[in-house]
Image (cartoon, rainbow, N blue to C red):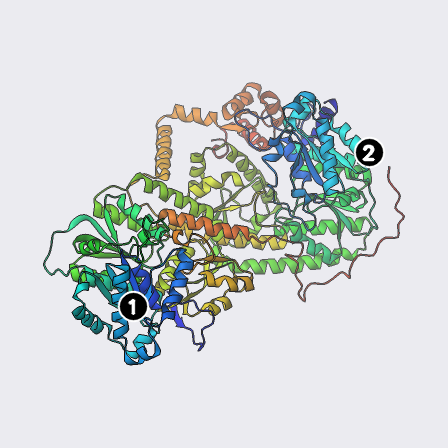
Amino acid sequence: MSTLAAKVQEVFNEPGCDKNKGKSEKERKKGCTKQLAPGAAAGGCAFDGAKIALQPITDVAHLVHGPIACEGNSWDNRGAKTSGSSLYRTGFTTDIGETDVVFGGEKRLYKSIKEIIDKYDPPAVFVYQTCVPAMIGDDIDAVCKAAAKKFNKPIIPVNSPGFVGPKNLGNKLAGEAILEHVIGTQEPEYTTPYDINIIGEYNLAGELWQVKPLLDELGIRILSCISGDGKYNEVAYSHRAKASMMVCSKAMINVARKMEERYDIPFFEGSFYGIGDMSDSLREIARLLVERGAPAELKDRTDAIIEREEARAWARIAPYKERLTGKKVLLITGGVKSWSVVAALQEAGMELVGTSVKKSTKEDKERIKELMGQDAHMIDDMTPREMYKMLKDAQADIMLSGGRSQFIALKAKMPWLDINQERHHAYAGYEGMVELVHEIDKALFNPVWEQVRRPPPWQETTWEERANAAIAAEAAELAADPVKAEQVRREKRVCKCHNVNVGALEDAIVAGSLTTVDALAEATHAGTGCGGCRDTMEQMIEAANAGGAVPASKAA
Amino acid sequence: MARVEVSKKACAVNPLKMSQPIGGALAFMGVQGCMPLLHGSQGCTSFGLVLFVRHFREAIPLQTTAMSEVATVLGGLENVEEAVVNIAKRAKPEIIGICSTGVTETKGDDVDGYIQLIRQRHPELDHMGIVYVSTPDFKDAFQDGWGKTVSKLIEAFVPANATPIQRAPQRVNVLPGCHLTPGDIDELRDIIESFGLEPTFLPDLSGSLDGHLPEDFTPTTLGGTTRDAMAQMGSAAWTIAVGEQMRLAATTLERRAGVPFVLFDRLTGLAPNDELIEFLSRISGRPVPLKFKRQRGQLVDAMLDGHFHFGAKKVTIGAEPDLLFAIGSWLIEMGANVTAAVTTTHSAVLEKLAIDEVLIGDLEDLENRSKGTDLIMTHSHGRQASERLGVPLFRLGLPTFDRLGAGHELTVGYRGTRTLIFNIGNMFISQAHEPGPDTWRREDENVTHFGGEPAPELVQITAMA
């Protein structure tokens, strides 16, 4: 396991990550993933993350080496679309049993690879390690190597057993696997000055195809998309691209950065979500390509297309304005990594609640990002009643969020739209934003809401009424008891990763006369996990040093 | 508020409508020991018979007066008399239910007069009920024949009672429209009995055409409303009519025996069932049983889960007015767009449908309006249009001859509505369009082209270390 441990350490130390660069040497070693709290953890494991990142490669067989749980319970559950082979959707697993656990599963793995090659003859087989074979010491690297030699075919080991960490780590380990074994192993038939890679785009719901026609129109060739609608050979010769776009999630930042290091392929971080971000991304692609030697006129053509497409998109959103003006949207997401959807919603006349954004300047965008990043995080450990209170307080007409909060919204009879990974609608590019507004309109004006909000034909205290009563009782209790109110205020968690509350931070600031976030982090460990609470910490320090209390809006 | 239009075509293509007499015959099939008899040529009966056999997959009692050309011209008294006598001898029914047809109505046979004559000539048949309904093929449609027949049954078997009588507070009459299946009737019975009430259904297809294995083989109906039960209907506390088509029968019963009625124009959807439950709770004086609270919760949840798939879906419906109204109104409440509604006949309920237009027309009209939609809902004859247009068909109503279990399809009650959400929602899910690389590619005059594939670079590619 020493190589895997080293790899994990290496992945944690990601120089391409701003957040990571902001940390002290010591914190950096701890890694960017929050320690999972037993009993309070949610989300996928590293294996899940690795599979998510690579499975969109459509023409290879993805073989999961492990007991049935790992593949049997999860196969074909993602919405990555293909324009060609659908072998990637076939579930392959060694389904190891007791005997394999006792005697080792390597032989079964080897035979499985052989059977797959005999029956399906894919261009490559990706072999995913899982916890149990990792524990019993199955050496998948060796098996893959032997099989590759024997069958004369790339057999790629993906060493990311679930217990090494969460999903995000698995994404990166998957990236390491293709960097080590796939990228740079083949050559394209030809290259052009317009060849790009798109890294970290999974073609969920076919979103890549909302963008690709515009690139085609510009003559820009997607040499390789890693990994949405990808083919093995495309990934293998992706090192010949002139530039890369890293789609705004940090999932595959290591791939983008190392390709820059190894192959001189510059990259930028961009997003296809939202009209502004889409235009920015097109401009960036053109800029990088021109820097790498493409004719300068590409920029002009890009600007022309952006102008045309933006005008068309706004014109298509305009008709919704009348119906949507004044509607309040509660946007809570960790899913769609772009905040410029906000601009589209505002353009359609909608108001965002829970934030005080009027116009999306760049600074505003950052602020929304911080605010919502926190909310998105917060929602993970909210009780249904707390969430109901939030919906009610926000007086929202519709909630946009990831799948987790779906049922709270629905049971509170609140229109809800899925903007998470499992969504069925494609929201990328100019087309996607129009689609999003259309979907919001559809959800908001569905007459089903009138129906389901009807009181039943019998006397009943609904759960909403009970929740309202409980909320009111709590508020009354706190109002009557300042000591308890102060206690509750101090107990409010700030750092979710390390479970540090307001009181502990305030005490630490006072006790150590701390003036910097780093010092406070050093003292309390707060802000050393995901880093999402560092803004709040900074405000608390400012407030304390200004002699006042912690701003109520933030801490209470 | 829908505007009701009538198709201006001379020629009906792929008919949606079926005729009145067989609607009447079906109503008779919900009465115990009955032999429906169509007064017409034998084809009138055999077509109806085949239709019902294919739909219910059951033996169907249905006889004919077998009018010949000569008999048609001279009048059908002899044929009716002979038919009644023969049926009485061979099948020994308690009731013979006669429906006229286009042939005999065109001739102008006075069947009521015939029956008087037959009664005089055959006192040995006094114990047997003979009910006649005028149902010309060339007027109205299936559901009208049904409604008129129920009204006639009431006139024949519910004693007229001018003076107030003691009403049994727990007894309720239920007059279901022909759009309710035997399964629907079972469901309604279960709901009503849960309140300690004793329902009498007229007609009651759940007893006769529910697909049970009979203990005996008789040529008449087996199961259904008995004469005794009909005779008692006058002393029930309430009548519940389901479907506008039952207004005539409910009014007849009210006028005849003073039984007040409430008419539910549909029992599909949340609100109408809330009303039903509230009504039953009120007249029974009992609290709503727990199971309905659970069922309602399940329905609301199904609506919430289902609305994602119904929202903005384009659905076209071809059905008789009451079924169209029930299903159409409910679909609209689920967020679907009913983009075309075709029906068979006039009804007061059509105007209440919250769409622009309802067309009295045929399946060709429905097909022409179903291009590019997400779902067609009509009876099995919609399958050709469905195939031609590539739009899936949800089989709704009679005849459903190419699917099993037509008699047990549910559309009423909280549970029936919930089931409908799942069945139709699953059809929407299974037809979800898979996006492809060209889904969002557009070819209009604004789109410029770079000029094909970019030219390959003339660079030597050397393998990298």
Disc 2 on helix, strand or loop?
helix
Residue A223 relative to residue A206: left or right: right
In-image side of A417 versus A454 (left or right): right
Q: Nearer the viewer, residue B317 or B51?
A: B51
Residue B259's disc is none
Q: Would you name the residue on which mark 1 appears?
A: B99
Quadrant hosting residue A517: top right
Give the letter of the chain under mark 2: A
The residue nearer to you, when weighing A164 against A268, is: A164
Return the x and y of residue B213 as percentages of the image width and height.
36, 48
- Res B380 seen here: yes
Chain of the residue under label 1? B
Instruction: Where is residue A216? Give x, y as percent.
Output: 73, 56
Q: Mark 2 and mark 1: span between their CA atoms?
A: 85 Å
Asked if residue A72 is positioned above or below residue B354 in the image, the reply reads above
**Rendered location of residue A408, percent (x, y):** 45, 39
- Find numbered disc 1 in the image and state the secondary structure of the residue it sits on: strand
Would you name the residue on which mark 2 appears?
A149
Q: Residue at x 84, y 54 (%)?
A: B456
- Toward the left, the furthest residue is B163
Q: How many marks?
A: 2
**Relative to the observer, which residue lies in front, B223 or A554?**
B223
